Amino acid sequence: MRKIIVSLNTTLDGFMSGSNGELDWHFDYWDEEMAAHANLHLRDADTIILGRVTYEVMSRYWQSTSTGLEQSREDLAFADMMNNYKKIVFSRKLKLAGWKNSSIVRSLNTTIIRHLKKAGGKDMIVYGSGKIVSKLMQLDLVDEFIIWTHPVILSRGQPAFGRLGSKLELIPDSPKFLRSGVLMTRYQRPELVSVNQNRDLPQGHTAFHPMVSIKGLS
């Protein structure tokens, strides 16, 4: 079954954007190393899930980047995937999805997501889209997180994780500090890690992993 993977830029104090949706705090940290890792993540997927606001910002940026002669090889490769992959935007307000291979879905619920997960193909990746991420987490439908923690403190803004109702325990996998100072960490559901890694252990043994918890807002 396909996985849903959330890729999220956050500050040290847990915000994904400023109070008015500002994202400029992380622009200076995007470099060839970060782009190379993002490329690897996106190659494992074939579908991008977005909310309306993130969709509108990304569509303008990546469509223009695809023709930029000053762009790096990594940026151009990422832009090619962003522009050509299937994109699903969950929105009740968006009237037209003009970005190539985009479709609008008016409601986000368990039935729709489970149908997408069972469909053939590679994994699905979510970029930004705080409200969509919160809803997917409330429905217990996120399989993995890739968190890019930036050495920035905003003090106020939009929290990376909203109201969940209950805590979510995750296992960190291969945290990596990038040259820019960004900490990239993949977090997985314990049941997924256990299924994949216990297969290789001797009978009667199980893998042990430290866990972290996400509680969201109370």
Image: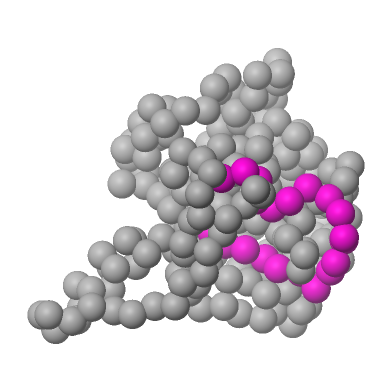
State the scheme by which the image is colored: one colour
* Residue 31 visible, this angle: no
Residue 168 belongs to magenta span: no
Residue 105's quadrant in the figure? top right
In the image as oriented, which residue stretches furthest toward the front?
218
Percent position of residue 128, x then y: 68, 47
The total number of labels drawn is 0
- The residue closer to the viewer here, 155 or 26, is 155
Percent position of residue 108, x then y: 52, 28
* Residue 193 visible, this angle: yes
In the image as oriented, which residue stretches furthest toward the top?
95
Percent position of residue 216, x then y: 62, 52
- The residue closer to the viewer here, 145 or 62, is 145
In the shown orientation, is residue 197 left or right of residue 143? left
Classify 141 as above or below 180.
Answer: above
Q: Residue at coordinates 46% horizontally, 38% vertically from top-left?
A: 139
Q: Residue at coordinates 36% horizontally, 31% vertically from top-left?
A: 115
First to last magenta residue range? 145-164
Q: Residue at coordinates 38% horizontally, 27% vertically from top-left?
A: 111
Percent position of residue 98, x then y: 69, 25
In the shown orientation, is residue 17 left or right of residue 36? right
Residue 195's quadrant in the figure? bottom left
Residue 161 belongs to magenta span: yes
Q: Residue at coordinates 56% horizontally, 52% vertically from top-left?
A: 6
In the image as oriented, which residue stretches furthest toward the left?
203
- The residue closer to the viewer here, 42 or 206, is 206
